[in-house]
Image (cartoon, grey):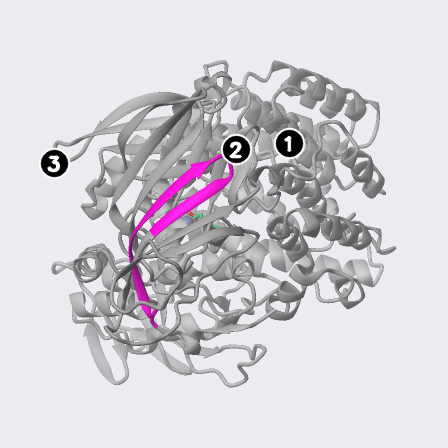
C-alpha cells in the first residue's frame, strides 16, 4: 500500500461543477461538468475507481479526447451492491439499497475525483422496481417522480448545495416514515422524516425528539439554522459505524435510532440523543464548511463531537456527561499515550485514520480548550467568523485556528502544537503556601514523551482551570495572580472568581495567588480543562476533602479516582508480595459518607472504584470487601431507588437507576465492565435480590443490569436467566446483541469456549458489524479471558480478524485495534492481514 503524506497536498487540477447520477439495478451513469482550475493547462484528469466495471466514457458526447476548457464527461459503470460486504459505496442491507461514501466509498459507485476539496452540485435520478423499492431517496429536494414501464418508477433529486462526494447518499427500499415538522427561528417549515421498516416505526419517537431538540439547540447556542426544507434519517441494520451525516439524508445504524423503554437502556437513549445531534450538527460543521483533505478530519469531527457533547450536557447533567467522556478518553488512550497526533503527517489507508484517538476524543478536547481559553462568548465569535469566511469551502485546521484567534484578537501562541505533536503531556505541579506574604504558589513543569518519529518535543499551551478550597471545603475568592513578574487581576465584573484559567505554556511555569489567608487545597484541572496527565502533590487528606466538598463535580469524581488508584497500587504490591490484602478503613469510610448522602449526582463516584485495566484479583477483592463492609448501605440504596413509575429519560431517573444498579447490579448495561457490588458476593440472598430485580424490571436498563449481575457468578441461576432472556427477546436483534456482549465480556474462567460456540449460534452473523462488535468486541474487552496466559484469547481474535478482513476490512481493522492496548503480542500481530498492518505499525507504538 502507498503511504499518503500531508506535505504532498496539491489542489485538484479540475473542478467538478455538477454531477448527474442515475442508478438502474446496478448500472450507474454519471454526467459530470468538468472545468480546469487553470484555463489552458494540460494536466491529465485522473479519476478514482474501485471494484467498478467501466462500460463507457464520453467527453462532450464524443469519444475520449483531451479537451481544454470546460467539458462534459459521461461515464457508465456496472457494480454489484448485493455482493458488497464491505458496506462502503452502494450496498444492500436487509433487502434495501443504501450508501456509505465517507471517506473513499464514492469511488466504489463510479469513477470520480473522490476527494473532499472537489465540491459539486449533485442531481441524482434513481430508477428501480416499484414494488421491491417503493421508496427512493437522495440528497436535497425531490424535483420529480413518476412511473416507468415494466413496473418501475423513478425519482429525481437535486441538492442545491455544493458538496464533496463523501456526502452523497442514496437509499432505495421498503421503508416507512415517522413524519414531523420543525419551524426554524426564521419561520421556515422543515419536514422531518425518519425511515425504518414498518414494524420498527414505534421505536423512532426518541430519535425524533432528539432531532428536534438538536435543531433548536443549534439555533439557540450557535445561531445555526437548517438550510433545506426536508431532513431525512434512514435506519439500516448493517452499518460499519454509528451513523453518517450525508447532506439532508443521514443514514444511521439502527442501534442509534430504535429505542423503547422495554428494549433500550439508558445508555442507548443517551447515545441516540448524542449521535442524532452529532450528525445533525455536521450540516454546518462538516457539510457547509468541509475538509480540504482527510488530514483535516479533526476539523469536522473534533468540532462536531465537541458540539454534541455540549448538546448532551445541556440536555442532561453536565458533570455526569463530562465524567463519562473523560473516562472514555482515558480508557481508550491509557496504553497508547495518544501515540498519534490528531493530524498525522501521513496515512496508508484512510479508514484506519478513524481511530478513537485521531478522530474523536482528543480532537474534541482541543476544541474544548479554545472555548475554555476564549470563554463561551469568544468561542461563539470565533465560530461566527469561521462561517463568515469559509461557508461553501473546503478548509484546514489552521483556518479554524485563525478564525478563533482573529475574532478575539487573542494570543493563542503555540496552541497549534496540539494538532501536530503526538503524545500526552505529563504535567507535574508542586504547591507551596507562604503565610506571611499570604500567597499560594503553583509551580508547573511539563514534558511530552517521545513518540515514534517525534523525538524532540516542544512545551504545549495548556489551560489549567484552578479553584482553591478552605480546609472546610469552601471556595476561596480569587482576585489576582502573579505570573512572569506581573500581577494580573482576575476579577469578573468587579467580582472575584472561584475558578481561574492558568495558561501554562513553558517547560517550567509558576503562578502565585495573592491574598490567600490560609493554606488552601487546590482543585486542579477543573472539568478536565486540558487532555493531559497531571501529577500533583495533593495528600490523601486533601483528596478526601475534595471528594467530599469540591464545587466542581468533575473534580470530586477525580479525587475519588486518584484515591482508588492509589489504593489499587498499594494492594497490587501487597498481592505480588503475597501479603494479606486489607482495605484501608479510611477509604471505606469515605465511600460510606457518600453513599449515605441522599443527593444523586454522585453516582459516578461509585461507578469506577478502580481503573478498568488494573489487576483483576485486586479489583475483585476491593469490590467484594466494599460489598461486605457496606452491605447495609448498598441494600438501602437498592430499596430506596426502586420505582414503579413508567420509564422516563431524564436526569433524575437516570441517576436513580444508575445508583440502584451499581449498588445491586450493573450500570449502563452493555459494554461496561463496572461490576455490581452486592451481587459480587455471590451468596444466595443477594443472588435472589438480583433475580427479583430481573423479574420485576419494567425497562431494559434494570433488566439487563440485573442479568449482568447474576451472570457474573457461574452456576445454575446464570444459565437459567440467560436462557430466559434469550427466549424473551430472540426476535429483537438489538436486544439479542446485548445478550451476546454480556456473555462475551464475562470474566468466568475459560470463556473463550463459550464465545466460540456463540459464533455458531443462529443469532450470530459475521457479516453484521453490530454482532461482531457485541460478541468479538465484547470478548476483547474482558481483561481476564482476552488476555488469558495461554494465548487463547489472542489466537481467537487473530483467526476472526483474518476471516473478517475478507468480508469487511473496516470491521476487521476495528477489531484488531484491541491489540493496540497491549504491547506484548508481536507474535500474534504478524499473522494478521494487510489491514492489521497499518494499525499495528502506525498507532500501536
Ligand atoms: N463521519 C462519519 C464517520 C464515517 C466513517 C467512515 N469510515 C460519522 C460521523 O462522525 O458523524
Ligand atoms: Zn462526525
- Total of numbered circles in the picture? 3
x, y (%) of residue 220? 20, 41
Task: Name the residue tied to disc 3.
Answer: 186
C-alpha span from label 3 to label 2: 33 Å
Residue 563 in which image quadrant: bottom right
Q: Is residue 427 visible?
A: no
Which region is colored magenta?
11-31
Q: Secondary structure at mark 2?
A: helix
x, y (%) of residue 604? 51, 42
Give the mark nearest the N terminus, 2 or 1. Answer: 2
C-alpha span from label 1 to label 3: 43 Å
> For the C terminus, which image quadrant?
bottom right
Q: Which labelled disc corresponds to residue 737?
A: 1
Task: Name the residue tied to disc 2.
Answer: 255
Residue at left offset 59%, top offset 44%? 589
Residue 277 in which image quadrant: top left
When the figure is inspected, residue 106 is found, relative to residue 680, above or below; the finding is below
Residue at left offset 36%, top offset 75%? 43
Q: Is residue 325 visible?
A: yes
Q: Is residue 776 left or right of residue 40?
A: right
Residue 379 in which image quadrant: bottom left
341 or 580: which is nearer to us?
A: 341
Give the mark nearest the N terminus, 1 or 3. Answer: 3
**Marks 2 and 1 close (CB-CB < 8 Å):** yes
Q: Indicate if the residue with disc 2 has its beta carbon within 8 Å of ligand 1.
A: no
Amino acid at each position: 500500500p502507498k503511504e499518503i503524506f500531508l506535505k504532498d497536498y496539491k489542489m485538484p487540477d479540475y473542478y467538478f461543477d455538477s454531477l448527474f447520477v442515475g442508478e438502474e439495478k446496478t448500472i450507474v451513469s454519471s454526467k459530470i461538468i468538468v472545468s480546469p482550475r487553470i484555463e489552458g493547462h494540460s494536466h491529465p484528469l485522473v479519476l478514482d475507481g474501485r471494484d467498478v466495471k467501466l462500460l463507457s466514457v464520453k467527453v462532450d458526447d464524443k469519444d475520449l479526447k483531451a479537451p481544454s476548457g470546460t467539458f462534459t464527461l459521461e461515464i457508465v459503470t456496472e457494480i454489484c451492491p448485493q455482493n458488497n460486504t464491505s458496506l462502503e459505496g452502494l450496498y444492500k442491507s436487509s433487502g434495501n439499497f443504501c450508501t456509505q461514501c465517507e471517506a473513499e466509498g464514492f469511488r466504489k459507485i463510479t469513477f470520480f475525483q473522490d476527494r473532499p476539496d472537489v465540491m459539486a452540485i449533485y442531481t441524482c435520478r434513481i430508477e428501480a422496481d416499484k414494488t421491491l423499492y417503493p421508496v427512493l431517496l437522495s440528497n436535497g429536494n425531490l424535483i420529480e417522480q413518476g412511473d416507468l414501464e415494466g413496473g418501475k418508477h423513478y425519482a429525481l433529486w437535486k441538492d442545491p448545495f455544493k458538496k464533496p462526494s463523501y456526502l452523497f447518499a442514496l437509499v432505495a427500499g421498503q421503508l416507512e416514515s415517522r413524519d414531523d415538522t420543525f419551524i426554524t427561528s426564521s419561520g421556515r417549515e422543515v419536514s422531518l422524516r425518519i425511515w425504518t421498516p414498518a414494524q420498527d416505526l414505534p421505536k423512532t419517537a426518541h430519535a425524533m425528539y432528539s432531532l428536534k431538540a438538536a435543531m433548536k439547540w443549534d439555533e439557540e447556542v450557535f445561531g445555526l439554522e437548517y438550510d433545506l426544507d426536508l431532513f431525512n434519517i434512514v435506519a439500516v441494520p448493517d452499518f460499519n459505524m454509528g451513523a453518517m451525516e450525508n447532506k439532508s439524508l443521514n443514514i444511521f445504524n439502527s442501534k442509534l435510532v430504535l429505542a423503547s423503554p422495554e428494549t433500550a437502556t439508558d445508555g442507548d437513549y443517551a447515545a441516540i440523543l448524542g449521535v442524532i445531534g452529532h450528525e445533525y450538527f455536521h450540516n454546518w460543521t462538516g457539510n457547509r464548511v468541509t475538509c480540504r483533505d482527510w488530514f483535516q478530519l479533526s476539523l469536522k469531527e473534533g468540532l462536531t463531537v465537541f458540539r454534541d457533547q455540549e448538546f448532551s450536557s445541556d440536555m442532561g447533567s453536565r458533570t455526569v456527561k463530562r465524567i463519562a467522556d473523560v473516562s472514555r478518553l482515558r480508557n481508550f488512550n491509557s496504553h497508547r499515550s495518544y501515540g498519534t497526533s490528531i493530524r498525522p503527517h501521513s496515512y496508508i489507508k484512510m479508514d484506519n485514520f478513524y481511530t478513537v484517538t485521531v478522530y474523536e476524543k482528543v480532537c474534541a478536547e482541543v476544541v474544548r480548550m479554545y472555548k475554555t481559553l476564549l470563554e463561551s462568548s469568544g468561542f461563539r465569535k470565533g465560530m461566527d467568523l469561521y462561517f463568515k469566511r469559509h461557508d461553501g469551502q473546503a478548509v484546514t485546521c489552521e483556518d479554524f485556528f485563525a478564525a478563533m484567534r482573529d475574532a478575539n484578537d487573542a494570543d493563542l501562541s503555540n496552541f497549534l502544537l496540539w494538532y501536530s505533536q503526538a503524545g500526552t503531556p505529563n504535567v507535574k505541579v508542586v504547591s507551596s503556601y507562604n503565610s506571611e506574604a499570604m500567597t499560594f504558589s503553583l509551580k508547573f513543569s511539563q514534558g511530552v514523551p517521545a513518540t515514534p518519529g517525534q523525538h524532540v518535543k516542544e512545551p504545549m499551551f495548556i489551560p489549567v482551570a484552578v479553584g482553591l478550597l478552605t480546609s472546610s471545603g469552601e471556595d476561596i475568592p480569587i482576585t489576582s495572580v502573579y505570573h512572569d513578574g506581573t500581577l494580573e487581576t482576575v476579577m469578573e465584573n468587579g467580582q472575584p472568581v472561584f475558578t481561574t484559567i492558568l495558561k501554562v505554556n513553558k517547560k517550567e511555569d509558576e503562578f502565585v495567588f495573592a491574598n490567600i489567608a490560609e493554606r488552601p487545597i487546590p482543585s486542579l484541572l477543573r472539568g478536565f480543562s486540558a487532555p493531559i496527565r497531571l501529577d500533583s502533590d495533593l495528600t490523601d487528606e486533601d483528596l478526601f476533602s475534595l471528594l467530599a466538598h469540591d464545587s466542581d463535580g468533575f473534580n470530586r469524581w477525580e479525587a475519588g479516582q486518584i484515591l482508588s488508584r492509589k489504593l489499587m497500587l498499594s494492594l497490587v504490591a501487597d498481592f505480588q508480595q503475597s501479603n494479606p490484602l486489607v482495605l484501608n478503613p479510611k477509604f471505606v469510610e469515605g465511600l460510606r459518607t457518600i453513599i449515605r448522602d441522599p443527593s444523586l449526582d454522585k453516582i459516578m463516584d461509585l461507578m469506577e472504584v478502580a481503573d478498568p485495566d488494573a489487576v483483576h484479583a485486586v479489583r475483585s477483592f476491593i469490590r467484594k470487601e466494599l460489598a461486605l463492609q457496606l452491605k447495609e448501605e448498598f441494600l438501602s440504596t437498592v430499596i430506596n431507588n426502586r420505582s414503579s413509575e413508567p420509564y422516563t429519560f431524564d436526569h433524575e431517573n437516570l441517576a436513580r437507576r444508575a445508583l440502584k444498579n451499581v449498588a445491586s447490579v450493573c450500570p449502563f448495561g452493555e459494554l461496561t465492565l463496572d461490576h455490581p457490588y452486592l451481587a459480587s458476593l455471590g451468596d444466595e440472598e443477594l443472588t435472589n435480590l438480583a433475580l427479583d430485580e430481573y423479574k420485576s424490571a419494567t425497562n431494559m436498563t434494570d433488566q439487563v443490569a440485573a442479568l449482568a449481575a447474576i451472570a457474573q457468578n457461574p452456576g445454575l441461576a446464570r444459565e437459567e436467566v440467560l436462557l430466559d432472556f434469550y427466549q424473551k427477546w430472540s426476535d429483537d436483534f438489538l436486544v439479542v446483541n446485548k445478550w451476546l456482549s454480556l456473555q462475551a465480556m464475562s470474566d468466568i474462567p475459560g470463556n473463550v469456549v463459550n464465545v466460540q460456540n456463540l459464533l455458531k449460534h443462529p443469532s450470530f452473523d459475521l457479516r453484521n458489524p453490530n454482532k461482531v462488535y457485541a460478541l468479538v468486541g465484547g470478548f476483547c474487552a474482558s481483561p481476564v479471558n482476552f488476555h488469558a496466559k495461554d494465548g487463547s484469547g489472542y489466537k481467537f481474535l487473530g483467526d476472526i480478524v483474518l476471516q473478517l478482513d475478507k468480508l469487511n476490512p473496516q470491521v476487521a481493522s476495528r477489531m484488531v485495534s484491541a491489540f493496540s492496548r497491549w504491547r506484548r503480542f508481536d507474535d500474534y500481530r504478524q499473522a494478521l492481514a494487510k489491514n492489521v498492518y497499518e494499525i499495528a505499525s502506525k498507532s500501536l507504538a
